[in-house]
Amino acid sequence: MDNAAPDFTGPYLDVDEWHDTPVRHRYVHGGFTGTDTRFSLYFPPPEQYRGRFFQHITPVPDSEHLAQSATGREDKIGFAVSSGAYFVETNGGGSPATPGGQADPTVTAYRANAAAAQHSREVARSMYGDHRPYGYAYGGSGGGYRTIGGAESTKGVWDGFVPYVIGSPMAIPNVFSVRMHAQRVLRGALDRVADAADAGSRQAPDAGLTEEQRQALAEVTRMGFPTRSWFGHATMGFHAFGTLYPHVGLVDPGYFEDFWTVPGHLGADPDSSVHRDRVRHRCATTGTLTRSQATALGVPERHAEGTPRGGVDNAFQGPGGDEDTAVAVGVPGLPADTTIQGADLKVVSGKAAGARVTVTAVHGDTAVLDNPDSRGVLADLQPGDTVELDNSAFLAAQTYHRHQVPDGTYPVWDQFRAADGTPLYPQRPFLLGPLFTEAASGHLPTGRFTGKMIVVSCLLDREAFPWQAAWYHDRVREHLGDRTDDDFRLWYVDHALHGDDEVQEHPTRTVSYLGVLHQALRRLSAWVETGEEPAATTRYTVDDGQVRVPDRAADRLGVQPVVTLTADGADRAEVAAGQSVRLKAVAETPPGAGQIVSVAWDFDGTGSFSDTTDPGPAVAVTVERDHVFTEPGTHFVTVRVASQPDGDPATPYARMDNLARARIVVS
């Protein structure tokens, strides 16, 4: 269907039935005649309903059935019902708009979601009686763009908003490009960088680096990549850039030639390491490989945090991937030391000639696809066909941000300006980031919205650098001035990444922020409906691209508990094997943010946290204990605490986590 100008005047319902999982609810499914928009509504029994709904906005238009498979703290239906709300989800209106495309971006940005929200009120009135349900929209990453788009472009649809892990209009593709540049230049050194940024280190992150590496680390840090987040470099990949990259090429194709030929671009510098890393390899392929075939050849499975659906992505488990789907291609003849972060694989001969896919890595003679070939692009590829592997465009993309210097409201780009404010490098004829943002959210964020809003941002976010939430806070202050706190909050979450997942890839390094989202939605609804103000905005500063927060909960504010851990009185202890170490954890909650309900310990780095302490609900807790390490080496102890607004240790909802680490060097 053409969704360029849909008419949302023909709603229909095609499913209406009661379900008992994950909780008792009435399930209603429907859509709008003549459009691609579909929606699912989940209504609690009347005795549990409190006159509101929560609506989740996905990063891109997606299925309207996602909530049905979620469990635990990710269970959006169960959370909504426990909060006296019905839950709304849509498919976002169908295929999203793209930069330079013809489709109306407002449809998938907010209009389809708004139409479903409005019609849900009609269904709610028929079930619960005449009333106007309060409505609250929330979404993360690209869904954060879309949530803000709805907040700033509609009136009377929603009453409040929780955008989370949000980007700025300059985020895409720049947060990915600068990260990829650092990953390439710093490969082989990132373990040292991560260790230097960890607890108890006595080294600067740039210690022992070459000048090129030091400059790359400084560049990505000033752009906002959280230095403490480098521990995940091995599985970080390039995240969403594989999806965005083709659009960059379509909108600005000339850049990829200019990069290699025009002075002022890294590729035009004959001494740059990009020439060492450039791969242009043509060969007769040995054919495609399925997941099991690639695994049998020793190709490792890649896990990456923060995927579009909020889960842990597996390189062999992309959309539609199954055992018969190609996940890799044989490319014999590559030099043994070939390293590729991303590349184009083009079929040159045979029935599949002209086909092109994105490669995320090479392992020996195998090129791993960014996503399984569920669309069958390589279905006709046969052994002996000629293919070409070329990473020239990906190398060029790594410094695209240098040629996208925006206005002074983005100080992270000051590193690319001369003393007089002019750019140091040649600039492209337009800024690409705002085009992507407008395609996602329907317009460029201004900070002018109706209703109330709580933004949640994560201090270890590698995809939506934390300063971008502060950028939006600044736009709101430009609009509301002294009245900002009447309608807006920004809560930062420490030790949290981008994906809204319960299970963490590195549980001794990061925590889930789902509990903070739960608290944001519940406090937002109370703020709108009763005037009860939520916890204050987190106190923060932005220093050279890095967001910094105070050490103590009473000074930091927000809602997340704060915990410190010492070993023999410091964040580092040096002891002999068999010698006891005195550990001290101090946890506290910000004013009005609940009570500590759990203290859990990990001594072996497995993240099992099997050793727990029941502190009894309290706003401040101190736990001391002794531990003995018998094996020489460097060990880390991690303590994880949880708080809950009502001091309830049993509920999975609004349970807010934080952690702290200490280094123990055993001789």
Image (spheres, grey):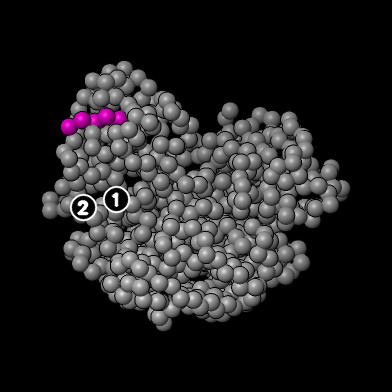
| Coordinates of residue 222 in the picture (x, y in percent) | 34, 65
Amino acid beneath label 2: Leu
- Circle on res. 483: none
Of the pair 616 and 123, the residue shown nearer to us: 616
Of the pair 566 and 333, the residue shown nearer to us: 566
Could you say whether the residue bearing mark 1 is in a helix, strand or loop? loop
- Circle on res. 266: 2
Residue 639 is inside the magenta segment: no
Res. 90 in view: no
| Coordinates of residue 468 in the picture (x, y in percent) | 46, 62
Amino acid beneath label 1: Gln
Q: Quadrant of residue 246?
A: top left
Residue that badge 1 annotates: 398
Q: Is residue 1 left or right of residue 78?
A: left
Could you classify mark 1 by the number of other residues whose Cα lies within 10 Å: few (under 14), some (14-19), or many (20 or more)? Answer: many
Q: Are marks 2 and 1 in contact (CB under 8 Å)?
A: yes
State the quadrant of the N terminus: top right
Residue that extends furthest to the top in the rendered view of this protein: 351
